[in-house]
Image: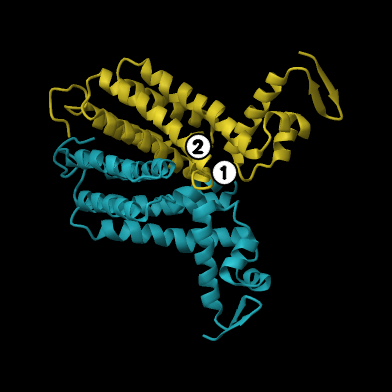
Chain colours: A cyan, B yellow
Protein backbone atom coordinates (compact mmCIF):
# COMPACT_ATOMS: atom_id res chain seq x y z
CA UNK A 1 0.00 0.00 0.00
CA UNK A 2 1.44 3.36 -1.08
CA UNK A 3 0.19 6.58 0.46
CA UNK A 4 1.01 10.09 -0.69
CA UNK A 5 0.17 13.04 1.55
CA UNK A 6 -1.00 16.09 -0.40
CA UNK A 7 -2.77 19.10 1.07
CA UNK A 8 -3.56 17.04 4.16
CA UNK A 9 -5.40 14.38 2.17
CA UNK A 10 -4.16 10.85 1.70
CA UNK A 11 -4.12 9.55 -1.86
CA UNK A 12 -3.85 5.83 -1.74
CA UNK A 13 -3.92 2.85 -4.04
CA UNK A 14 -5.47 0.78 -1.26
CA UNK A 15 -9.21 1.27 -1.71
CA UNK A 16 -10.08 -1.51 0.75
CA UNK A 17 -7.92 0.17 3.38
CA UNK A 18 -9.67 3.49 2.80
CA UNK A 19 -13.06 1.86 3.01
CA UNK A 20 -12.10 0.25 6.33
CA UNK A 21 -10.72 3.55 7.64
CA UNK A 22 -13.89 5.42 6.69
CA UNK A 23 -16.00 2.82 8.50
CA UNK A 24 -13.70 3.06 11.54
CA UNK A 25 -13.83 6.85 11.81
CA UNK A 26 -17.58 6.96 11.13
CA UNK A 27 -18.22 4.28 13.77
CA UNK A 28 -16.17 6.30 16.24
CA UNK A 29 -17.85 9.61 15.37
CA UNK A 30 -21.35 8.08 15.58
CA UNK A 31 -20.43 6.71 19.03
CA UNK A 32 -19.21 10.11 20.20
CA UNK A 33 -21.88 12.41 18.80
CA UNK A 34 -24.46 10.32 16.96
CA UNK A 35 -25.34 9.82 13.30
CA UNK A 36 -27.20 13.09 12.72
CA UNK A 37 -24.62 15.23 14.48
CA UNK A 38 -21.82 13.77 12.32
CA UNK A 39 -21.50 15.34 8.87
CA UNK A 40 -20.09 13.76 5.73
CA UNK A 41 -17.41 16.46 5.94
CA UNK A 42 -16.46 15.26 9.43
CA UNK A 43 -15.98 11.74 8.06
CA UNK A 44 -13.92 13.01 5.08
CA UNK A 45 -11.69 15.01 7.41
CA UNK A 46 -11.29 12.28 10.03
CA UNK A 47 -10.67 9.62 7.40
CA UNK A 48 -8.31 11.81 5.35
CA UNK A 49 -10.42 11.20 2.24
CA UNK A 50 -11.56 13.37 -0.65
CA UNK A 51 -15.29 13.78 -1.30
CA UNK A 52 -14.88 11.71 -4.46
CA UNK A 53 -13.19 8.84 -2.63
CA UNK A 54 -15.80 8.82 0.11
CA UNK A 55 -18.57 8.96 -2.49
CA UNK A 56 -16.98 6.05 -4.37
CA UNK A 57 -17.30 3.79 -1.33
CA UNK A 58 -20.45 5.27 0.20
CA UNK A 59 -22.60 7.18 -2.30
CA UNK A 60 -24.86 8.49 0.48
CA UNK A 61 -24.64 9.15 4.21
CA UNK A 62 -27.24 6.44 4.65
CA UNK A 63 -24.98 3.92 2.85
CA UNK A 64 -22.23 4.85 5.30
CA UNK A 65 -24.65 4.44 8.23
CA UNK A 66 -25.71 0.99 7.01
CA UNK A 67 -22.06 0.05 6.48
CA UNK A 68 -21.26 1.05 10.06
CA UNK A 69 -24.20 -0.96 11.40
CA UNK A 70 -23.56 -4.08 9.33
CA UNK A 71 -19.75 -4.11 9.40
CA UNK A 72 -18.80 -2.42 12.67
CA UNK A 73 -21.68 -2.51 15.16
CA UNK A 74 -22.48 -6.15 14.30
CA UNK A 75 -18.77 -6.98 14.75
CA UNK A 76 -18.70 -5.20 18.12
CA UNK A 77 -21.69 -7.22 19.38
CA UNK A 78 -20.06 -10.39 18.06
CA UNK A 79 -16.73 -9.68 19.79
CA UNK A 80 -18.17 -8.29 23.04
CA UNK A 81 -21.10 -10.61 23.59
CA UNK A 82 -21.61 -13.46 21.16
CA UNK A 83 -18.12 -15.00 21.08
CA UNK A 84 -17.51 -14.85 24.88
CA UNK A 85 -20.94 -16.25 25.79
CA UNK A 86 -20.80 -18.96 23.12
CA UNK A 87 -17.39 -20.09 24.38
CA UNK A 88 -18.18 -19.88 28.11
CA UNK A 89 -18.60 -22.83 30.47
CA UNK A 90 -22.27 -21.84 30.99
CA UNK A 91 -24.61 -19.10 29.84
CA UNK A 92 -24.61 -17.72 33.39
CA UNK A 93 -20.84 -17.59 33.60
CA UNK A 94 -20.49 -16.10 30.12
CA UNK A 95 -23.05 -13.38 30.79
CA UNK A 96 -21.58 -12.41 34.17
CA UNK A 97 -18.08 -12.35 32.65
CA UNK A 98 -19.24 -10.00 29.87
CA UNK A 99 -20.83 -7.62 32.40
CA UNK A 100 -17.65 -7.68 34.46
CA UNK A 101 -15.34 -7.16 31.48
CA UNK A 102 -17.33 -4.20 30.19
CA UNK A 103 -17.78 -2.60 33.63
CA UNK A 104 -14.03 -2.97 34.27
CA UNK A 105 -13.25 -1.39 30.88
CA UNK A 106 -15.56 1.55 31.64
CA UNK A 107 -14.00 2.05 35.07
CA UNK A 108 -10.55 2.05 33.49
CA UNK A 109 -11.55 4.47 30.70
CA UNK A 110 -13.34 6.76 33.15
CA UNK A 111 -16.16 7.49 30.70
CA UNK A 112 -19.14 5.78 29.07
CA UNK A 113 -20.00 6.24 25.39
CA UNK A 114 -22.72 3.62 25.58
CA UNK A 115 -23.59 0.54 23.55
CA UNK A 116 -23.10 1.31 19.84
CA UNK A 117 -26.11 -0.81 18.87
CA UNK A 118 -28.47 0.85 21.34
CA UNK A 119 -27.15 4.32 20.53
CA UNK A 120 -27.89 3.91 16.81
CA UNK A 121 -31.08 1.87 17.32
CA UNK A 122 -32.70 4.63 19.37
CA UNK A 123 -31.51 7.37 17.04
CA UNK A 124 -32.37 5.71 13.72
CA UNK A 125 -35.11 3.08 14.14
CA UNK A 126 -37.93 5.49 13.43
CA UNK A 127 -36.00 7.59 10.90
CA UNK A 128 -35.63 4.91 8.25
CA UNK A 129 -36.92 1.38 7.62
CA UNK A 130 -33.54 0.02 6.47
CA UNK A 131 -31.77 1.36 9.55
CA UNK A 132 -34.49 -0.17 11.70
CA UNK A 133 -34.17 -3.57 10.03
CA UNK A 134 -30.36 -3.48 10.36
CA UNK A 135 -30.55 -2.78 14.11
CA UNK A 136 -33.32 -5.37 14.58
CA UNK A 137 -31.19 -8.00 12.81
CA UNK A 138 -28.22 -7.34 15.12
CA UNK A 139 -30.40 -7.53 18.25
CA UNK A 140 -31.82 -10.76 16.82
CA UNK A 141 -28.39 -12.38 16.29
CA UNK A 142 -27.31 -11.34 19.80
CA UNK A 143 -30.48 -12.74 21.34
CA UNK A 144 -30.29 -15.94 19.29
CA UNK A 145 -26.72 -16.61 20.46
CA UNK A 146 -27.94 -16.37 24.07
CA UNK A 147 -30.92 -18.62 23.32
CA UNK A 148 -28.54 -21.27 21.92
CA UNK A 149 -26.26 -21.00 24.94
CA UNK A 150 -29.17 -21.28 27.40
CA UNK A 151 -30.50 -24.28 25.46
CA UNK A 152 -27.10 -25.96 25.57
CA UNK A 153 -27.36 -25.62 29.38
CA UNK A 154 -30.88 -27.12 29.15
CA UNK A 155 -32.29 -23.93 30.70
CA UNK A 156 -36.04 -23.41 30.82
CA UNK A 157 -37.45 -20.46 28.92
CA UNK A 158 -34.29 -19.76 26.95
CA UNK A 159 -36.13 -17.27 24.71
CA UNK A 160 -37.49 -15.17 27.55
CA UNK A 161 -34.22 -15.15 29.46
CA UNK A 162 -32.24 -14.17 26.37
CA UNK A 163 -34.52 -11.19 25.74
CA UNK A 164 -34.31 -10.25 29.41
CA UNK A 165 -30.49 -10.34 29.48
CA UNK A 166 -30.19 -8.23 26.31
CA UNK A 167 -32.73 -5.76 27.72
CA UNK A 168 -31.09 -5.53 31.15
CA UNK A 169 -27.69 -4.92 29.59
CA UNK A 170 -29.01 -2.39 27.07
CA UNK A 171 -30.85 -0.42 29.73
CA UNK A 172 -27.95 -0.62 32.16
CA UNK A 173 -25.70 0.89 29.49
CA UNK A 174 -28.21 3.71 28.93
CA UNK A 175 -28.19 4.46 32.68
CA UNK A 176 -24.39 4.12 32.76
CA UNK A 177 -24.13 6.68 29.96
CA UNK A 178 -26.40 9.12 31.79
CA UNK A 179 -24.47 8.63 35.06
CA UNK A 180 -21.06 8.26 33.40
CA UNK A 181 -20.48 5.34 35.73
CA UNK A 182 -20.35 1.55 35.58
CA UNK A 183 -22.58 1.35 38.69
CA UNK A 184 -25.77 0.28 36.84
CA UNK A 185 -23.90 -2.55 35.09
CA UNK A 186 -22.52 -3.81 38.40
CA UNK A 187 -25.97 -3.58 40.05
CA UNK A 188 -27.65 -5.46 37.19
CA UNK A 189 -24.97 -8.17 37.18
CA UNK A 190 -25.72 -8.88 40.86
CA UNK A 191 -29.43 -9.26 40.08
CA UNK A 192 -28.76 -11.47 37.05
CA UNK A 193 -26.40 -13.64 39.11
CA UNK A 194 -29.28 -14.23 41.54
CA UNK A 195 -31.84 -14.79 38.81
CA UNK A 196 -29.71 -17.26 36.85
CA UNK A 197 -29.03 -19.21 40.07
CA UNK A 198 -32.68 -20.07 40.52
CA UNK A 199 -33.85 -23.64 40.14
CA UNK A 200 -35.32 -23.92 36.67
CA UNK A 201 -32.93 -21.51 35.05
CA UNK A 202 -30.01 -23.91 34.99
CA UNK A 203 -31.73 -27.25 34.41
CA UNK A 204 -34.91 -28.27 32.66
CA UNK A 205 -36.32 -30.35 35.50
CA UNK A 206 -38.44 -27.63 37.13
CA UNK A 207 -41.09 -25.18 36.02
CA UNK A 208 -38.73 -22.25 36.07
CA UNK A 209 -40.13 -19.00 34.76
CA UNK B 1 -56.69 34.41 25.52
CA UNK B 2 -56.97 36.16 22.18
CA UNK B 3 -55.31 34.77 19.09
CA UNK B 4 -54.96 36.48 15.72
CA UNK B 5 -53.94 34.42 12.71
CA UNK B 6 -51.67 36.33 10.33
CA UNK B 7 -49.62 34.79 7.55
CA UNK B 8 -50.06 31.39 9.20
CA UNK B 9 -48.51 32.52 12.47
CA UNK B 10 -50.41 32.86 15.71
CA UNK B 11 -50.01 36.13 17.58
CA UNK B 12 -51.20 35.65 21.05
CA UNK B 13 -51.38 37.44 24.36
CA UNK B 14 -51.03 34.13 26.17
CA UNK B 15 -47.27 33.72 26.54
CA UNK B 16 -47.62 30.81 28.99
CA UNK B 17 -49.80 29.01 26.49
CA UNK B 18 -47.25 29.55 23.75
CA UNK B 19 -44.45 28.32 25.98
CA UNK B 20 -46.43 25.16 26.76
CA UNK B 21 -47.22 24.63 23.08
CA UNK B 22 -43.57 25.01 22.10
CA UNK B 23 -42.55 22.44 24.72
CA UNK B 24 -45.29 20.09 23.51
CA UNK B 25 -44.35 20.26 19.84
CA UNK B 26 -40.62 20.04 20.60
CA UNK B 27 -41.18 17.02 22.89
CA UNK B 28 -43.17 15.35 20.11
CA UNK B 29 -40.61 16.19 17.40
CA UNK B 30 -37.68 14.98 19.56
CA UNK B 31 -39.57 11.71 20.10
CA UNK B 32 -40.18 11.25 16.40
CA UNK B 33 -36.83 12.24 14.94
CA UNK B 34 -34.49 13.18 17.80
CA UNK B 35 -33.02 16.42 19.07
CA UNK B 36 -30.36 16.92 16.40
CA UNK B 37 -32.67 16.10 13.49
CA UNK B 38 -35.23 18.68 14.71
CA UNK B 39 -34.45 22.26 13.70
CA UNK B 40 -35.52 25.42 15.47
CA UNK B 41 -37.49 26.20 12.27
CA UNK B 42 -39.38 22.91 12.66
CA UNK B 43 -40.37 23.93 16.19
CA UNK B 44 -41.42 27.44 15.05
CA UNK B 45 -43.54 25.97 12.29
CA UNK B 46 -45.11 23.21 14.39
CA UNK B 47 -45.79 25.60 17.27
CA UNK B 48 -47.09 28.38 15.02
CA UNK B 49 -44.59 30.81 16.58
CA UNK B 50 -42.40 33.58 15.19
CA UNK B 51 -38.65 33.35 15.67
CA UNK B 52 -38.87 36.25 18.11
CA UNK B 53 -41.54 34.57 20.22
CA UNK B 54 -39.60 31.29 20.32
CA UNK B 55 -36.40 33.15 21.19
CA UNK B 56 -38.22 35.01 23.98
CA UNK B 57 -39.08 31.72 25.72
CA UNK B 58 -36.05 29.68 24.66
CA UNK B 59 -33.06 31.81 23.68
CA UNK B 60 -31.17 28.75 22.40
CA UNK B 61 -31.99 25.29 21.10
CA UNK B 62 -30.23 23.93 24.17
CA UNK B 63 -32.60 25.90 26.44
CA UNK B 64 -35.50 24.30 24.58
CA UNK B 65 -33.90 20.85 24.96
CA UNK B 66 -33.45 21.36 28.71
CA UNK B 67 -37.04 22.63 28.97
CA UNK B 68 -38.30 19.49 27.24
CA UNK B 69 -36.25 17.27 29.55
CA UNK B 70 -37.17 19.04 32.79
CA UNK B 71 -40.81 19.87 32.02
CA UNK B 72 -41.99 17.15 29.64
CA UNK B 73 -39.78 14.05 29.91
CA UNK B 74 -39.71 14.25 33.72
CA UNK B 75 -43.53 14.60 33.69
CA UNK B 76 -43.85 11.58 31.39
CA UNK B 77 -41.76 9.42 33.74
CA UNK B 78 -43.79 10.71 36.70
CA UNK B 79 -47.12 9.89 35.04
CA UNK B 80 -46.10 6.60 33.44
CA UNK B 81 -43.98 5.09 36.19
CA UNK B 82 -43.68 6.98 39.45
CA UNK B 83 -47.33 7.70 40.22
CA UNK B 84 -48.66 4.20 39.32
CA UNK B 85 -45.92 2.34 41.23
CA UNK B 86 -46.15 4.64 44.26
CA UNK B 87 -49.91 4.10 44.42
CA UNK B 88 -49.87 0.35 43.77
CA UNK B 89 -50.65 -2.40 46.31
CA UNK B 90 -47.05 -3.63 46.02
CA UNK B 91 -43.93 -2.76 44.04
CA UNK B 92 -44.32 -6.01 42.12
CA UNK B 93 -47.93 -5.31 41.18
CA UNK B 94 -47.19 -1.70 40.26
CA UNK B 95 -44.24 -2.64 38.05
CA UNK B 96 -46.11 -5.43 36.24
CA UNK B 97 -49.11 -3.14 35.74
CA UNK B 98 -46.89 -0.45 34.17
CA UNK B 99 -45.32 -2.98 31.78
CA UNK B 100 -48.78 -4.23 30.83
CA UNK B 101 -50.24 -0.74 30.37
CA UNK B 102 -47.39 0.38 28.13
CA UNK B 103 -47.29 -2.86 26.10
CA UNK B 104 -51.06 -2.64 25.58
CA UNK B 105 -50.74 1.00 24.47
CA UNK B 106 -48.01 0.08 21.98
CA UNK B 107 -50.06 -2.80 20.60
CA UNK B 108 -53.02 -0.46 20.18
CA UNK B 109 -50.92 2.27 18.51
CA UNK B 110 -49.19 -0.25 16.26
CA UNK B 111 -45.84 1.55 16.54
CA UNK B 112 -43.09 2.21 19.07
CA UNK B 113 -41.40 5.61 19.42
CA UNK B 114 -39.49 4.47 22.48
CA UNK B 115 -38.97 5.86 25.95
CA UNK B 116 -38.49 9.65 25.73
CA UNK B 117 -35.93 9.60 28.55
CA UNK B 118 -33.80 6.88 27.02
CA UNK B 119 -34.06 8.38 23.53
CA UNK B 120 -32.70 11.73 24.71
CA UNK B 121 -30.26 10.25 27.26
CA UNK B 122 -28.48 8.22 24.56
CA UNK B 123 -28.50 11.07 22.06
CA UNK B 124 -27.40 13.87 24.40
CA UNK B 125 -25.50 12.51 27.43
CA UNK B 126 -22.11 12.81 25.78
CA UNK B 127 -22.94 15.96 23.82
CA UNK B 128 -23.37 18.28 26.76
CA UNK B 129 -22.86 18.17 30.53
CA UNK B 130 -26.16 19.92 31.34
CA UNK B 131 -28.14 17.52 29.16
CA UNK B 132 -26.36 14.63 30.84
CA UNK B 133 -27.14 15.92 34.34
CA UNK B 134 -30.78 16.50 33.43
CA UNK B 135 -31.20 12.93 32.16
CA UNK B 136 -29.29 11.50 35.13
CA UNK B 137 -31.58 13.41 37.54
CA UNK B 138 -34.71 11.96 35.91
CA UNK B 139 -33.32 8.41 36.01
CA UNK B 140 -32.44 9.06 39.65
CA UNK B 141 -35.99 10.20 40.61
CA UNK B 142 -37.48 7.20 38.79
CA UNK B 143 -35.11 4.79 40.54
CA UNK B 144 -35.62 6.44 43.94
CA UNK B 145 -39.41 6.08 43.65
CA UNK B 146 -38.94 2.34 43.06
CA UNK B 147 -36.49 2.09 45.97
CA UNK B 148 -39.09 3.70 48.27
CA UNK B 149 -41.82 1.36 47.03
CA UNK B 150 -39.63 -1.74 47.49
CA UNK B 151 -38.68 -0.54 50.98
CA UNK B 152 -42.33 -0.02 51.85
CA UNK B 153 -42.80 -3.72 50.97
CA UNK B 154 -39.76 -4.51 53.17
CA UNK B 155 -37.98 -5.95 50.14
CA UNK B 156 -34.33 -6.92 50.37
CA UNK B 157 -31.89 -5.09 48.13
CA UNK B 158 -34.32 -2.35 47.15
CA UNK B 159 -31.52 -0.33 45.50
CA UNK B 160 -30.30 -3.14 43.29
CA UNK B 161 -33.79 -4.21 42.26
CA UNK B 162 -34.81 -0.65 41.44
CA UNK B 163 -31.80 -0.22 39.13
CA UNK B 164 -32.53 -3.60 37.56
CA UNK B 165 -36.19 -2.77 36.86
CA UNK B 166 -35.34 0.60 35.29
CA UNK B 167 -32.62 -1.07 33.19
CA UNK B 168 -34.83 -3.96 32.05
CA UNK B 169 -37.61 -1.57 31.05
CA UNK B 170 -35.23 0.84 29.29
CA UNK B 171 -33.56 -1.92 27.32
CA UNK B 172 -36.87 -3.62 26.51
CA UNK B 173 -38.10 -0.32 25.04
CA UNK B 174 -34.92 -0.05 22.93
CA UNK B 175 -35.53 -3.55 21.57
CA UNK B 176 -39.24 -2.78 21.11
CA UNK B 177 -38.32 0.29 19.06
CA UNK B 178 -35.95 -1.74 16.86
CA UNK B 179 -38.57 -4.49 16.39
CA UNK B 180 -41.56 -2.13 16.33
CA UNK B 181 -43.27 -4.58 18.63
CA UNK B 182 -44.26 -4.86 22.30
CA UNK B 183 -42.82 -8.41 22.41
CA UNK B 184 -39.66 -7.50 24.40
CA UNK B 185 -41.76 -5.72 27.06
CA UNK B 186 -44.05 -8.74 27.43
CA UNK B 187 -41.05 -11.10 27.64
CA UNK B 188 -39.32 -8.97 30.28
CA UNK B 189 -42.50 -8.63 32.33
CA UNK B 190 -42.71 -12.46 32.56
CA UNK B 191 -39.10 -12.62 33.80
CA UNK B 192 -39.65 -9.80 36.31
CA UNK B 193 -42.81 -11.49 37.58
CA UNK B 194 -40.73 -14.58 38.34
CA UNK B 195 -37.86 -12.61 39.85
CA UNK B 196 -40.08 -10.50 42.12
CA UNK B 197 -41.86 -13.65 43.33
CA UNK B 198 -38.68 -15.02 44.86
CA UNK B 199 -38.40 -15.35 48.62
CA UNK B 200 -36.42 -12.38 49.84
CA UNK B 201 -37.75 -9.98 47.26
CA UNK B 202 -41.12 -9.51 48.95
CA UNK B 203 -40.20 -9.71 52.64
CA UNK B 204 -37.08 -8.94 54.63
CA UNK B 205 -36.97 -12.22 56.52
CA UNK B 206 -34.59 -14.00 54.14
CA UNK B 207 -31.25 -13.28 52.61
CA UNK B 208 -32.63 -12.62 49.14
CA UNK B 209 -30.47 -13.52 46.21
Q: If the image is split into quadrants, where does the C terminus of chain A sit? A: top left
Residue B174 percent across, percent down from the top left: 45, 42
Write down the quadrant of residue A158 in the picture.
Answer: top left
Secondary element at image label 2: loop
Write down the quadrant of residue B208 in the picture.
Answer: top left
Q: Chain of mark 1?
A: A
Q: Is label 1 in contact with label 2 (beta carbons under 8 Å)?
A: yes
- Give the crowd class for mark 2: few <14, some 14-19, many >=20 residues within 10 Å: many
- Give the crowd class for mark 1: few <14, some 14-19, many >=20 residues within 10 Å: many
* Residue position for label 2: B114
Which mark is on residue B52? none
Q: Distance from label 1 to label 2 (Cα)?
A: 9 Å
Residue B62 in sight from this viewpoint: yes
Q: Which residue is rendered at x = 40% and y = 51% of the image?
A: A111
Secondary element at image label 1: loop
* Residues flagged by tags 1 and 2 on a common chain: no
Q: Nearer the viewer, residue B156 or B171?
A: B156
Write down the quadrant of residue B192 in the picture.
Answer: top left
Q: Which residue is rendered at x = 57% and y = 49% of the image?
A: A129
Left or right of A15 in this view: B56: right
Left or right of A148 in this view: B56: right
Q: Chain of mark 2?
A: B
Q: Is residue A1 above or below residue A121?
A: below
Q: Residue furthest top?
A: B1
Residue B180 in sight from this viewpoint: no
Residue A63 percent across, percent down from the top left: 59, 61
Q: Residue furthest bottom?
A: A2
Residue B70 percent across, percent down from the top left: 53, 29
Q: Residue furthest right?
A: B7
* Residue position for label 1: A126
Q: Which residue is rendered at x = 43% and y = 54% of the image?
A: A138
Q: Nearer the viewer, residue A111 or A193?
A: A111
Amino acid sequence: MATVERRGLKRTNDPDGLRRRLLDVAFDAFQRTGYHATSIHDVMRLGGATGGALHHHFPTKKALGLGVLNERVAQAVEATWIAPVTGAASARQGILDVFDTIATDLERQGGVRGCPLNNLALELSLADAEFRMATEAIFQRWREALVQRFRADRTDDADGLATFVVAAYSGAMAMAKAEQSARPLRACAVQLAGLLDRPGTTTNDSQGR
